[in-house]
Amino acid sequence: MVDMFMDEYDEEKIARLFRRDGYREGLREGTIRALAGLVRDGLLDIIIAAERAGVTEDEIRLAIDSNGGDSC
């Protein structure tokens, strides 16, 4: 059984999957932070920002609060 698992395990493939997932998560977080900055600055409505980011309005509010007033 262990031999079967080891034959199917591809370390480089797993590493690529983790990198891809990390990239996507980073891109998602960056998008949310950028849109939250626009909302905070009064340039974008929170409803539109949430729709564009594919998140809830509460998540945008959380991003605004976590930015602590810093620019994005």
Image: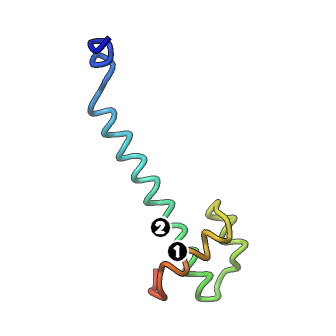
Q: Position of residue 38 (x, y in %)?
A: 59, 81
Amino acid type at image mark 1: Ala
Q: Position of residue 26 (x, y in %)?
A: 43, 60
Point out which mark residue 44 bears. Answer: none
Tag 1 and tag 2, C-beta contact below 8 Å: yes
User: Which is nearer the eye, 66 or 31?
Assistant: 66
Task: State the residue position of label 1.
Answer: 34
User: How many numbered dots are placed on residues in this image?
Assistant: 2
The residue sitting at 46% across, 60% down in the picture is 27
In this picture, residue 15 sits left or right of residue 32: left
Would you name the residue on which mark 2 appears?
Answer: 30
Q: Is residue 23 above or below residue 34?
A: above
**To which quarter of the image does residue 14 belong?**
top left
| Quadrant in the rendering for residue 4 | top left
Three-letter residue code for mark 2: Gly
Q: CA distance from mark 1 to mark 2?
A: 6 Å
